[in-house]
Image (cartoon, helix red, strand yellow):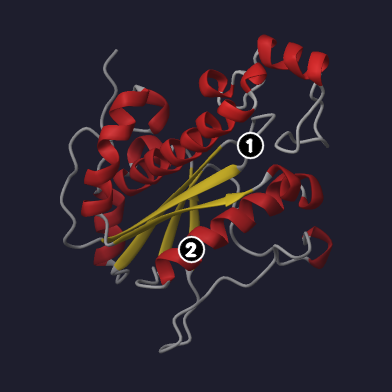
Amino acid sequence: MVSVPPTLLWERELAAAGYTLVAGCDEVGRGALAGPVSVGMVVIEAGTATDLPGVRDSKLLRESVRRELVPAIKDWAAASAVGHASAAEIDALGLVAALRLAGTRALAAVAASLLPSFVILDGNQDWLSVPLQPEFSFGPADAPLPGDSATGAAMEVRTRIKADMTCLSVAAASVLAKVERDAMLVALSEEFPQFGWDSNKGYGTAPHRAAIAAHGPTDFHRKSWRLL
Protein backbone atom coordinates (compact mmCIF):
# COMPACT_ATOMS: atom_id res chain seq x y z
CA MET A 1 0.00 0.00 0.00
CA VAL A 2 1.47 3.36 -1.04
CA SER A 3 1.31 6.00 1.68
CA VAL A 4 -0.44 9.28 0.95
CA PRO A 5 2.10 12.10 1.15
CA PRO A 6 1.64 14.81 3.77
CA THR A 7 0.20 18.11 2.60
CA LEU A 8 0.11 21.77 3.58
CA LEU A 9 -3.66 21.74 3.97
CA TRP A 10 -3.77 22.52 7.69
CA GLU A 11 -0.84 24.91 7.52
CA ARG A 12 -2.70 26.89 4.83
CA GLU A 13 -5.87 26.89 6.93
CA LEU A 14 -3.83 28.33 9.78
CA ALA A 15 -2.42 30.99 7.48
CA ALA A 16 -5.97 31.96 6.49
CA ALA A 17 -6.78 32.25 10.21
CA GLY A 18 -3.94 34.73 10.66
CA TYR A 19 -1.04 32.51 11.69
CA THR A 20 1.72 33.63 9.34
CA LEU A 21 4.58 31.56 10.75
CA VAL A 22 3.67 27.96 11.56
CA ALA A 23 6.06 25.41 13.04
CA GLY A 24 5.85 21.66 12.65
CA CYS A 25 7.33 19.76 15.59
CA ASP A 26 8.09 16.08 16.16
CA GLU A 27 10.22 13.97 18.49
CA VAL A 28 12.36 10.88 18.00
CA GLY A 29 14.04 8.60 20.50
CA ARG A 30 11.23 8.49 23.03
CA GLY A 31 11.38 4.71 23.42
CA ALA A 32 15.13 4.15 23.14
CA LEU A 33 17.28 2.75 25.93
CA ALA A 34 20.30 4.89 25.05
CA GLY A 35 20.99 8.27 23.55
CA PRO A 36 19.03 11.51 23.71
CA VAL A 37 15.46 12.30 22.98
CA SER A 38 15.46 14.72 20.06
CA VAL A 39 12.91 17.24 18.83
CA GLY A 40 12.84 18.68 15.33
CA MET A 41 11.17 22.00 14.54
CA VAL A 42 10.52 23.41 11.07
CA VAL A 43 9.05 26.91 10.67
CA ILE A 44 7.36 27.83 7.40
CA GLU A 45 5.61 30.88 6.02
CA ALA A 46 2.32 29.05 5.94
CA GLY A 47 0.59 31.16 3.31
CA THR A 48 3.31 30.97 0.69
CA ALA A 49 5.12 27.67 1.33
CA THR A 50 5.12 25.25 -1.58
CA ASP A 51 4.99 21.46 -1.54
CA LEU A 52 8.22 19.55 -0.93
CA PRO A 53 8.24 16.30 -2.92
CA GLY A 54 9.58 13.15 -1.30
CA VAL A 55 9.12 14.15 2.33
CA ARG A 56 7.25 11.65 4.50
CA ASP A 57 7.17 10.73 8.15
CA SER A 58 10.76 9.69 8.86
CA LYS A 59 9.69 6.16 9.81
CA LEU A 60 8.45 5.59 6.26
CA LEU A 61 11.72 6.55 4.57
CA ARG A 62 14.96 4.64 4.08
CA GLU A 63 17.94 5.99 5.99
CA SER A 64 19.73 7.10 2.83
CA VAL A 65 16.63 8.93 1.58
CA ARG A 66 16.24 10.76 4.88
CA ARG A 67 19.82 12.02 4.71
CA GLU A 68 19.37 13.17 1.12
CA LEU A 69 16.28 15.17 2.07
CA VAL A 70 17.94 17.21 4.81
CA PRO A 71 19.46 19.95 2.59
CA ALA A 72 16.17 20.38 0.71
CA ILE A 73 14.21 20.65 3.95
CA LYS A 74 16.59 23.26 5.36
CA ASP A 75 16.38 25.28 2.14
CA TRP A 76 12.58 24.98 2.11
CA ALA A 77 12.06 26.01 5.74
CA ALA A 78 12.07 29.62 6.87
CA ALA A 79 13.89 28.33 9.98
CA SER A 80 14.67 24.90 11.39
CA ALA A 81 16.48 23.29 14.31
CA VAL A 82 16.81 20.11 16.33
CA GLY A 83 17.03 20.14 20.13
CA HIS A 84 18.24 17.29 22.32
CA ALA A 85 17.93 16.19 25.94
CA SER A 86 20.55 13.71 27.09
CA ALA A 87 20.08 10.36 28.78
CA ALA A 88 21.26 11.96 32.05
CA GLU A 89 18.63 14.69 31.69
CA ILE A 90 15.95 12.07 31.01
CA ASP A 91 17.00 10.26 34.19
CA ALA A 92 17.00 13.47 36.23
CA LEU A 93 13.81 15.06 34.92
CA GLY A 94 11.68 12.25 33.54
CA LEU A 95 10.78 11.71 29.91
CA VAL A 96 8.03 14.32 29.52
CA ALA A 97 10.12 17.12 31.01
CA ALA A 98 13.11 16.01 28.92
CA LEU A 99 10.96 16.20 25.80
CA ARG A 100 9.96 19.72 26.82
CA LEU A 101 13.61 20.62 27.39
CA ALA A 102 14.62 19.33 23.96
CA GLY A 103 11.65 21.10 22.39
CA THR A 104 12.40 24.43 24.02
CA ARG A 105 16.02 24.13 22.86
CA ALA A 106 14.83 23.65 19.29
CA LEU A 107 12.38 26.51 19.70
CA ALA A 108 15.06 28.82 21.08
CA ALA A 109 17.25 28.04 18.07
CA VAL A 110 14.56 28.88 15.50
CA ALA A 111 13.36 31.89 17.51
CA ALA A 112 16.78 33.46 17.09
CA SER A 113 15.67 34.25 13.55
CA LEU A 114 11.92 33.60 13.41
CA LEU A 115 9.38 33.05 16.18
CA PRO A 116 6.38 30.96 15.10
CA SER A 117 2.93 31.97 16.30
CA PHE A 118 1.54 28.43 16.03
CA VAL A 119 3.17 25.04 16.66
CA ILE A 120 1.72 21.79 15.31
CA LEU A 121 2.81 19.03 17.68
CA ASP A 122 2.60 15.41 16.56
CA GLY A 123 0.61 13.08 18.79
CA ASN A 124 -2.07 13.59 21.42
CA GLN A 125 0.07 14.86 24.33
CA ASP A 126 1.21 18.47 24.61
CA TRP A 127 4.62 17.90 26.20
CA LEU A 128 5.94 21.24 24.89
CA SER A 129 3.78 23.66 26.87
CA VAL A 130 4.32 24.26 30.58
CA PRO A 131 1.65 22.41 32.61
CA LEU A 132 -1.03 24.65 34.08
CA GLN A 133 -1.27 22.59 37.27
CA PRO A 134 1.75 22.98 39.59
CA GLU A 135 1.49 19.35 40.67
CA PHE A 136 2.28 18.32 37.09
CA SER A 137 5.35 20.50 36.71
CA PHE A 138 8.74 18.87 36.26
CA GLY A 139 11.29 21.36 37.55
CA PRO A 140 14.01 23.08 35.58
CA ALA A 141 12.62 22.18 32.17
CA ASP A 142 9.46 24.18 32.86
CA ALA A 143 10.51 27.49 31.31
CA PRO A 144 7.67 29.50 29.75
CA LEU A 145 7.42 29.30 25.99
CA PRO A 146 8.25 32.59 24.29
CA GLY A 147 5.49 34.80 22.98
CA ASP A 148 5.28 37.69 20.58
CA SER A 149 6.92 40.55 22.45
CA ALA A 150 5.38 43.12 20.11
CA THR A 151 1.76 42.06 20.68
CA GLY A 152 2.00 40.16 23.94
CA ALA A 153 0.34 37.18 22.25
CA ALA A 154 1.30 33.74 23.48
CA MET A 155 2.39 31.06 21.07
CA GLU A 156 -0.35 28.53 20.44
CA VAL A 157 0.56 24.84 20.58
CA ARG A 158 -1.89 22.31 19.17
CA THR A 159 -1.51 18.53 19.08
CA ARG A 160 -2.61 16.48 16.11
CA ILE A 161 -2.62 12.69 15.94
CA LYS A 162 -0.54 11.41 13.03
CA ALA A 163 0.52 14.94 12.13
CA ASP A 164 3.83 13.48 10.97
CA MET A 165 1.90 11.63 8.25
CA THR A 166 -0.53 14.39 7.27
CA CYS A 167 1.20 17.77 7.84
CA LEU A 168 4.22 18.49 5.67
CA SER A 169 5.91 20.78 8.19
CA VAL A 170 5.73 18.07 10.88
CA ALA A 171 6.98 15.35 8.53
CA ALA A 172 9.92 17.57 7.63
CA ALA A 173 10.68 18.13 11.32
CA SER A 174 10.61 14.38 11.94
CA VAL A 175 13.20 13.81 9.20
CA LEU A 176 15.58 16.43 10.60
CA ALA A 177 15.29 15.04 14.12
CA LYS A 178 15.74 11.42 13.02
CA VAL A 179 18.79 12.12 10.85
CA GLU A 180 20.53 14.22 13.51
CA ARG A 181 19.84 11.78 16.35
CA ASP A 182 20.87 8.76 14.24
CA ALA A 183 24.18 10.47 13.40
CA MET A 184 24.85 11.00 17.10
CA LEU A 185 24.31 7.30 17.84
CA VAL A 186 26.46 6.21 14.90
CA ALA A 187 29.28 8.42 16.16
CA LEU A 188 28.93 7.04 19.69
CA SER A 189 29.05 3.48 18.35
CA GLU A 190 32.68 4.02 17.39
CA GLU A 191 33.49 4.43 21.09
CA PHE A 192 31.08 1.71 22.25
CA PRO A 193 30.89 -0.83 19.38
CA GLN A 194 29.64 -3.61 21.64
CA PHE A 195 26.15 -2.06 21.82
CA GLY A 196 25.48 -1.89 18.09
CA TRP A 197 24.20 1.69 18.17
CA ASP A 198 25.16 2.17 14.53
CA SER A 199 22.32 -0.22 13.63
CA ASN A 200 19.86 -0.19 16.54
CA LYS A 201 20.17 3.58 17.23
CA GLY A 202 19.86 2.96 20.96
CA TYR A 203 16.59 1.03 20.86
CA GLY A 204 16.00 -2.11 22.89
CA THR A 205 16.88 -4.91 20.50
CA ALA A 206 17.75 -8.29 21.96
CA PRO A 207 21.49 -7.93 21.10
CA HIS A 208 21.53 -4.46 22.68
CA ARG A 209 20.01 -5.73 25.91
CA ALA A 210 22.41 -8.67 25.92
CA ALA A 211 25.34 -6.26 25.56
CA ILE A 212 24.06 -4.21 28.52
CA ALA A 213 23.87 -7.39 30.59
CA ALA A 214 27.41 -8.35 29.59
CA HIS A 215 29.13 -4.95 29.81
CA GLY A 216 26.89 -2.82 32.01
CA PRO A 217 25.28 0.48 31.02
CA THR A 218 27.25 3.51 29.84
CA ASP A 219 26.66 7.17 30.68
CA PHE A 220 24.65 7.32 27.45
CA HIS A 221 22.12 4.76 28.70
CA ARG A 222 18.95 5.82 30.49
CA LYS A 223 19.81 4.25 33.82
CA SER A 224 16.41 4.95 35.37
CA TRP A 225 14.81 2.71 32.73
CA ARG A 226 14.38 -1.05 32.79
CA LEU A 227 17.39 -1.84 30.63
CA LEU A 228 17.37 -5.62 30.99
Q: Which amino acid, mark 2?
A: Leu
Q: Secondary structure at mark 2?
A: helix
Count the labels in the image.
2
Q: Name the quadrant containing residue 136.
A: bottom right
Q: Is residue 41 left or right of residue 136?
A: left
Residue farthest front in this picture:
191
Q: Residue at x 55, y 56 (%)?
A: 103
User: At which x and y percent is residue 6?
Assistant: 28, 37
* Residue nearer the viewer, 154 or 142: 142
Residue farthest bottom in this picture:
150
User: At which x and y percent is residue 46?
Assistant: 25, 61
User: At which x and y percent is residue 81?
Assistant: 41, 56
* Residue nearer the viewer, 4 or 139: 139
- Label 1 close to label 2 by CB (< 8 Å): no
**Which label sits on residue 35?**
1
Quarter placement of the C terminus: top right
Classify 10 Å Cα crowding around label 2: few (below 14), some (14-19), many (20 and above).
many
